[in-house]
Image: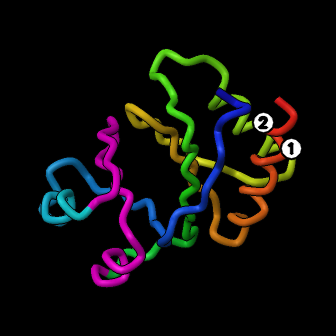
Amino acid sequence: MIAGMNPERQPGIWHFVSFALGDPAADRLVSSAHATMREPEGLSLLLSEEVAADQGLLSDLPMAQILLSVHSALDGVGLTAAVAVALADHGILCNVIAGARHDHIFVPVDDADRAVEILKVAADNA
């Protein structure tokens, strides 16, 4: 899977925001969220910059999305680790969200183009 990950930056800027469970603001925004995660501490939403700005919820860490276009499997082993290590070796933090078909890597906007290049090199060397 690593050799075929074909990282592609996606349009948009994203913000991770969190709310207490049951917060009416979160309930209103869930349908606008790109992704959600329920945690013991509350609900995390991944919002587009437009939605976050409209709600006064811009985070201090705007993120870019990199799609790994390889068809990954939920039971696959090693892809997330390879991506995280490759980026960490270059001082780039990442947040990985796995979908049923693809993995989505979120990195700081300022590091996005460099992250894509690093991942392409990792794929070529796999």
Q: Position of residue 10 (x, y in %)?
A: 52, 63
* 74 horizontally vs 91: left or right: left
Q: Position of residue 69 (x, y in %)?
A: 55, 43
Q: Quadrant of the C terminus?
A: top right
Task: Using the image, determine if residue 95 lies above or below residue 19.
Answer: above
Tell me residue 29's x, y (percent).
20, 64
Identify the residue shown where x is 29% and y is 40%.
38
Name the amino acid type tagged 2: Val
In the displayed structure image, the side of residue 1 where residue 115 appears, left or right: right
Residue at image location 35% in from the left, 75% down from the top:
52
Q: Nearer the viewer, residue 113 or 70?
A: 70
83 or 19, which is in the foreground? Answer: 83
Relative to residue 9, is residue 102 depicted above or below? above
Q: How are the residues colored?
A: rainbow
Indicate the quadrant where residue 117 lies.
bottom right
Amino acid type, mark 1: Asp
Quarter of image, res 55? bottom left
Q: Which residues are magenta?
A: 33-55
Q: Residue 59, labelled with which disc?
A: none
Instruction: Decide: is 46 above or below 82.
Output: below
**Residue 80 lies in magenta, yes or no?**
no
Q: Which mark is residue 85?
A: 2
Report, in whole angstroms, how far the alpha carbon at label 2 lies from the one at label 1: 6 Å
SS category of the residue bearing label 2 = helix
Q: Check disc 1: other Cα within 10 Å, few if <14, some if 14-19, many if 20+.
A: few
> CB under 8 Å between callouts 2 and 1?
yes
Q: At numbered mark 1, what does the secondary structure look like: helix, strand or loop?
A: loop
Q: Is residue 107 above or below residue 57?
A: above
| Mark 1, residue position | 89
